């Protein structure tokens, strides 16, 4: 069964149509690029997946949740299966990387101190930051901060990672490292959706592509 399955979905903000007749699906371990210009609807599509924006037209399932009928109390459970990587990091600047991760684990119900310690070390090792766990965010480079955001997104072993323009604030070499890391994560079985308006990543790291353009989603878009 697909992790995500959208059929004939219209995405609106207030009464304004952002995307119409959206149809797409995503399976376990797949990597999907959503490409398109700034303002074309990429971020809005992601927001519907984790219920920041609600769907009223068409049918949409994320995991086993029907987004048309999902109850408010169910949304936190859906979100626990999703890791979100923001362009602007959104790290807690007043505490170390270790305490950033500890905050998330406590907020999502972890109690076992040994298990928490093991999980934090595991994700920091996965993104190459284990030796910087006691460093503060401002002491990191932009690429290291984005790696930290990915580590945070991995904490609860999500089935899906949503990366919204994760390379937008990074230089090309560092951005390339982040895209490679996300591809490596997808190979472990975690599905990844990455939005970007930088077509270079799609050329360098090929994967399934859809394009937001003129309020539509264009499927199997290959001509870049």
Image (cartoon, helix red, strand yellow):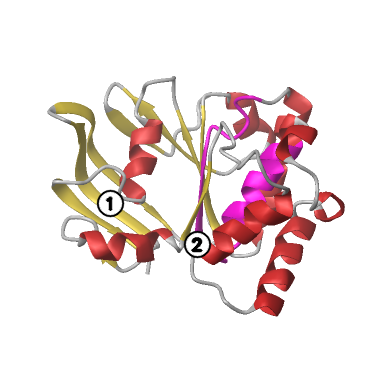
Which sits earlier in the primary sequence, circle 1 or circle 2? 1
Q: Nearer the viewer, residue 32 or 89?
A: 89
Q: Position of residue 153 (x, y in %)?
A: 57, 53
Q: Position of residue 205 (x, y in %)?
A: 66, 39
Mark nearer the viewer, 1 or 2 = 2
Residue at x 82% of width, y 56% of height = 130
- Relative placement, left or right, of 131 versus 104 is right
Q: Which residues are magenta?
A: 144-169
The secondary element bearing badge 1 is classed as: strand
The secondary element bearing badge 2 is classed as: helix
Q: Mark 2 highlights which residue?
A: 107
Q: Quadrant of residue 5?
A: bottom left
Magenta-span inclusion, residue 129: no
Q: Quadrant of the N terminus?
A: bottom left
Q: Mark 1 highlights which residue?
A: 6
**Eyeballing the image, is 219 above or below 1?**
above
- Relative placement, left or right, of 57 versus 163 is left
């Amino acid at each position: 069964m697909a992790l995500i399955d959208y059929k004939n979905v219209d995405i609106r903000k207030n009464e304004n149509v952002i995307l119409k007749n959206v149809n797409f699906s995503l399976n376990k371990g797949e990597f999907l690029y959503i490409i398109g210009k700034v303002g074309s609807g990429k971020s809005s599509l992601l927001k519907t997946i984790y219920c920041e924006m609600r769907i009223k037209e068409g049918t949409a399932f994320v995991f086993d949740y029907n987004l048309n009928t999902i109850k408010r109390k169910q949304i936190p459970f859906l979100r626990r299966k999703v890791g979100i990587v923001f362009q602007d990091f959104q790290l807690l600047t007043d505490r170390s990387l270790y305490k950033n991760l500890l905050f998330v684990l406590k907020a999502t119900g972890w109690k076992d101190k040994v298990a928490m310690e093991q999980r934090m070390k595991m994700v920091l090792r996965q993104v190459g930051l284990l030796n910087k766990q006691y460093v503060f965010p401002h002491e990191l480079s932009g690429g290291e901060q984005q790696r930290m955001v990915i580590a945070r997104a991995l904490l609860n072993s999500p089935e899906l990672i949503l990366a919204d323009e994760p390379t937008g604030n990074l230089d090309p070499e560092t951005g390339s490292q982040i895209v490679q890391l996300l591809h490596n994560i997808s190979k472990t079985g975690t599905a990844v959706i990455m939005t970007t308006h930088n077509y270079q990543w799609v050329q360098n790291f090929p994967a399934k592509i859809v394009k937001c353009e003129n309020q539509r989603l264009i499927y199997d878009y290959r001509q870049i």
